[in-house]
Image (spheres, coloured by chain):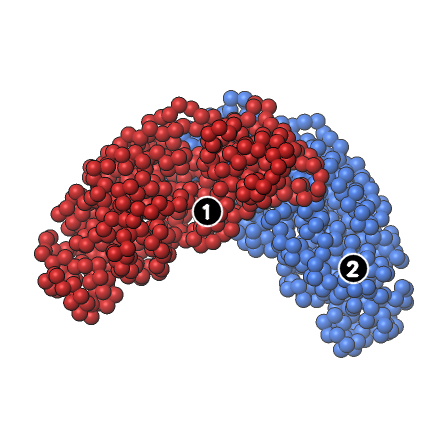
Chain colours: A red, B blue
Amino acid sequence: MAAIHLPASRPWRPSFAALAGLLTLGAAGLLFLAAAPSSPPPSAEAVRATRSNVAALRDGALQGTRAYDIVHSLTTEVGPRPAGSDGDRRAVAWALRTLKELGFENVRAEKVTVPHWEIGAGEGRITAPWPQPVVLAALGGSVPTPAGGIEAEVLEVPSVQALAGLDPARVKGKIVFIDKRMERRRDGSGYRETVPGRSTGAAQAGKLGALAVIIRSVGTDTDRTPHTGGLKYEAGVPPIPAAALSNPDADLLESEVKSGRPVTFRLTLTCRSLPEAESANVIGEIPGRERPEEIVLLGAHLDSWPLGTGAIDDGAGVAIVVEAARRIGELKVRPRRTIRVVLYANEEFGTSGGPAYARAHAAELPKHVLAGESDLGSGRVWRLSTHFAPEVLPRADELLQLLAPLGVERGDNEAEGGADLEALAPARVPLIGLGQDATRYFDWHHTANDTVDKIDPKDLDQNVAAWAAVAYAAAELPGDFGRAPEAAKPRRR
Amino acid sequence: MAAIHLPASRPWRPSFAALAGLLTLGAAGLLFLAAAPSSPPPSAEAVRATRSNVAALRDGALQGTRAYDIVHSLTTEVGPRPAGSDGDRRAVAWALRTLKELGFENVRAEKVTVPHWEIGAGEGRITAPWPQPVVLAALGGSVPTPAGGIEAEVLEVPSVQALAGLDPARVKGKIVFIDKRMERRRDGSGYRETVPGRSTGAAQAGKLGALAVIIRSVGTDTDRTPHTGGLKYEAGVPPIPAAALSNPDADLLESEVKSGRPVTFRLTLTCRSLPEAESANVIGEIPGRERPEEIVLLGAHLDSWPLGTGAIDDGAGVAIVVEAARRIGELKVRPRRTIRVVLYANEEFGTSGGPAYARAHAAELPKHVLAGESDLGSGRVWRLSTHFAPEVLPRADELLQLLAPLGVERGDNEAEGGADLEALAPARVPLIGLGQDATRYFDWHHTANDTVDKIDPKDLDQNVAAWAAVAYAAAELPGDFGRAPEAAKPRRR
């Protein structure tokens, strides 16, 4: 990337509208500045430098970044890193080492207490009418089965919602099979429609007296690689073992059920819960040159599920935000505000790192001017969503203009930012969501197939381009995004 | 399919050339019959009926067949069926039941003694420099490791051939990693280039004192599903354990090796050899109306590897040849010769059924006028190859004309027919190969991912169309293909 010159400090601070106008209109954009009546007109030099920095960060990243090398390093040198595991500890060490090597400042680990659950081995077998082994994996947090397993008749339901209408006498003593198929869509919205079976199926089936629950994997693939993911038991309901069948195995079980003959199934899970463990949020900064106390937070999560090496979930996000910030840090003159990269502990198993960060940084959250998290794999950014106060919403369009050359469309103002950012809601931190193409993400999400070969380095580069442009603009420009609305937002995971 | 009328018996027997001409040229093809000077001209009715039968078989199949239902039934009701296993016995019972239900005659099981090896569990772990679990599977026939596994330094080689030049001192005491990647091609020819590492790696590495061998899977996918397959030990060389890593795991191991640090690996295999078992070739026939002693043999193999349900290998082939023959059997007037479907025992683990058939039927092999086997999955037929005597080679072009509407091209005269047909070579049985599109076949071949969802029913229908057209023509028309050349042909598996 070419060296970029920015005048160190000037009284004029262009508004987003002005900057976007400049980027879009080039020289003609100078006319646009008349729309900022309270500011004196900027010098032509300042205009050129600001425009040059955003465009150079964005377009330079498209020429190639270190993002793939970063995720390759994490997945090779650490690999699986579920909360509380040895891999988790090695991931924290990797992150500290990597952020320092890449030139970040104020690199530190902030202690987070995390739960520790081991997935163990999962074995399943259809025992009648046609005996067949199947491939499955325990759902995150499941209790184990007895050592000899659980064998019972299968009751298939099309969704967890369908359980509500059932006579408990039909469910009692059965293994409930929740057979809902996830739809493939670019925005990944099929996930939200399907994931309740995973997260609440054990509680709902347990209430009705089921012995165990097995679900069709929440995934869009046809691989023999089951998708794990967290579940939630309910207080007062006995926890029952829960596992996900791979999609081909769910097809097989469905076919046996459709034969009309009684179907029985044997499930054995050796997962277990261990005492809480210590992990850490790992933080690195590009300190702001004028207002270092004002923070633009770029997040990703460091932990992963144990089945794969956590490449798309969320090694990709780690690589994207680290590399985006690193490139901003390479500018000859850094932006006014601080870019803070937070690599969160334990997002997957109940989200420890996000709340821990919010508690530890409560005093400075009012100075968090913007936060975003990259946690939807490595697909290209195609949609910008926000969670801004209504009065600053026009600024979303201005940000959009910075990203327009990347093919980014306008989304809504309901951005959730990322699971780790939910804890920022009480402080009304404005959120940005750079929606990624999730067409293939749920083929591999939470499976053994979450490995680095699934990532196209050019896709990561495009993500780096988008995050670097947005983060730089948010950290450099004088205007901010106010405080976000208080409305609670639904969780995706 | 509409009812088809064929005159029962007539002195005139059109040549293939005449028939092909008719099919291609329509009414104008009548002129073509003048090219068969030794035969009296056929009646217009005979010409129409013959043309009608071939076209109706071919084009009718494209409208939909039972082939998918057949492979769905096999994979659901039986599933994995490696030689000697319970699944193998259930597969034989399934085949007898299914052929009878579908209206075949002379349905029987012909006893075959088969080897019996169980794949057991395979565990692998890179233990240094960066510890990570990997996914692997024992190669077919491997000896197990000691219960505690084998841990040793890894020596990576780019191919089994590269072992030849190595100083045994470099290999002794190591785990050899054969890291050759299979190329994806429509004709599947990347397999033959890569498979020697799997079939001979253990013998070659064992000769040099290696403790074990691990290979990059012989497959074109990026799934965490290793590809097993047979190996051959050599007399006088101590057998060493051998396993295949999934492609993503081979990538990971390769990355660790490329770090330049010493890499160590722990391998544990619980596979085992058991006493020989009894299985069977299952046979069903559509007896010929005039020359029932002359046989057109359509083969596929009934056994599978244990990891998947054997849908593409070779449930698809079973479904294709059974359904092609069944449709011929539905004709109001069956063809002159017998169509014999042979569902072979144990193709995968050293080919027992093919030789057993050749021994049991030695006396009638001279009356086998043509043989073909469907064993390359469910991809569409795109190439016709043969193994014919040179003097009847023009007939290959005539057959090609029957298949031209299906988009089939001309291949060579080196068809191997299929592994089970190799035993027919001494009897010089003419072979036909209907080459399938294998672009995706080796993504799933010999893996847990070999399941019925990988099959598009329309692709199976196209295969049925091709086999039904060719088999009918071979069984109906007077000319034959002589006897095949004696030249030995290389084995694909």
Side of B126 relative to A400 (left or right): right
Pick whichever, A1 or A232, lies toward us: A232
Q: Position of residue A490 (x, y in %)?
A: 40, 45
Q: Is residue B64 visible?
A: yes
* Residue beneath disc 1: A192
Q: Is residue B193 left or right of residue B94?
A: left
Q: Amino acid at mark 2?
A: Tyr
Amino acid of disc 1: Arg
Task: Name the quadrant containing residue A175.
Answer: top right
Chain bearing tag 1 is A
> Which residue is at 35% across, 51% downward?
A414
Q: Position of residue A464 (x, y in %)?
A: 31, 51
Image coords of residue B256 (percent x, y): 39, 36
Q: Is residue B214 visible?
A: no
**Residue under the image location 21 percent in, 52 percent down:** A480
Label placed on residue A287: none
Which residue corresponds to mark 2? B472
Residue B316 horizontal side relative to residue B424, left or right: left
Where disc 1 sits, the SS reads helix
